[in-house]
Amino acid sequence: MPIKNLLVANRGEIAVRIIRAARNMGIRSIQAYSEVDSDSLAVRLADESVLIGKAPASKSYLNIDSIVAAALDSGADAVHPGYGFLAENADFADAVESANLIFVGPKGDTMRRLGDKVLARETAQAVGLPTVPGSFERIESSDAAQSIIEKTGFPILIKAAAGGGGRGIRTVRNQQDFVRLAPQARAEAKAAFGDGGIYIEAYVHKARHVEVQVIGDGTNAVHFFDRECSLQRRRQKIWEEAPAVPVPSDVREHLCRSAKDFAESVGYRGAGTLEFLYEPETKKYYFLEMNTRIQVEHPVTECVTGTDLVRESIRISNGEPLRLQQSDIALRGHSIECRINAEDPANGFMPSPGTIDALSVPGGPGVRFDSMLFAGCSVPPFYDSLLGKLIVWDECRSSALRKMKGALNELEISGVNTTKPLHQALLDNKNVIDGDIHTGFLDEWLENYDFRLTE
């Protein structure tokens, strides 16, 4: 039976994105919302909306029982989890399907296998993907940690076994750091994902973060090429590009084919992303994890391949087979995305909730702004600070950089502080212009950059 009514179990710009995709498919949208989001753009755009709880995420967007009840009460046929919150929660996927509803994403069992980063590493090794040296099981004791550290040496990364988005990650340079930071990583992972499990990886110095977008129908899969995600602040991506800057065509072909083969080997259904560390000097890459959901940065892939990834994932969840062959998907041009967050770069990136007094959005060919904003809307303090994503496309990277500079100059958001000045500064940075960056570049650069001098 085709999906006629889709409950959106998320908020912000991704909820708006899903609602628009559903509308274009002739699907009726139902927006789940917390009390503080009652006048959000997603609620305004949806065909129907349903209250799921109070402002704290634990009482609304992380409340499985409330969301499933809302889906049933509203007559939904399917539930889309977006990204974050419950998007990679296998119990949520199971609960949705147990209620005879369609979950837009992979099966719960697949999410357990791949959403758990430790199990995903094991799966990658089994199909021949190289992995970063480290643990292949959760670290449950000091003795187990020491055994791994003796093999890898310092520095290492402590990483959350569940979830994503950079949460639960700590860089550890010595034994004293490990004793201090391991409990912090566990606590952050538990708070963010409801799972405090951690594992250890060796720290790969000055590596690039490259990822490959895939979609599968449970039998066959295709890839949509690669993305560059190395500009990160405290492990949080702030700028993404497609295709990845440093990857030669022969390496790209092998990397993307490996990602496609991985997705097929696990019978993957839906949209997903394989993340890798890449060393430009050696041209070696290492599997990190697979995100079993749509990614924040999916628009840059849509721009360079001409594919609506949200629509395709909804179609597949509705039981339709892949309608694309790998030969149908080609790279065209270059795309850049800047995440616009409600944070104050001049004040240590302090969150900046408030009310949007005025909004002016750039336009023109190859310019896109995916956001939750409108003049007068509220930016609550309870959730992630992402306001929207400014995306540009052009025929080559240099043209895309120029287009992004112009689009940022046109973008005006008043009422809250935003990270627009950060992106403007990066567009004047020679390393960024030349593509000479790595995952630690932005944090190192920010140590010596004072945004107050540019105000």
Image (cartoon, rainbow, N blue to C red):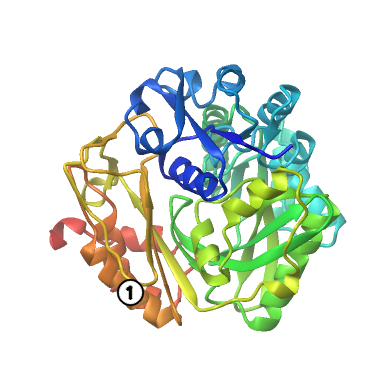
Q: Is residue 122 left or right of residue 376?
A: right
The C terminus - image quarter: bottom left
**In the picture shown, does residue 253 fall above or below 270?**
below
Question: Residue 195 falls in which quadrant of the image?
Answer: top right
The N terminus - image quarter: top right
- Comparing 433 with 394, the one in front is 394
Q: Which residue is mark 1?
A: 403
Q: Position of residue 114 (x, y in %)?
A: 74, 44
- Comparing 370 with 343, the one in front is 370
**Label 1 crowd (10 A; few <14 / some 14-19 / many >=20):** many
Q: Position of residue 8 (x, y in %)?
A: 53, 34
Q: Is residue 339 left or right of residue 247?
A: left
**In the picture shown, does residue 163 fall above or below 20?**
above
Can residue 290 be seen here? The reply is no
Q: Position of residue 54 (x, y in %)?
A: 41, 17
- Comparing 157 with 91, the one in front is 91
Looking at the image, which residue is at 57% across and 49% down?
A: 25
Question: Residue 350 falls in which quadrant of the image?
Answer: top left
Q: How many marks?
A: 1
The amino acid marked with disc number 1 is Lys
**In the picture shown, does residue 175 fall above or below 60?**
below
The kind of secondary structure element at disc 1 is helix
Can residue 193 be seen here? The reply is yes
Q: Position of residue 281 (x, y in %)?
A: 61, 79
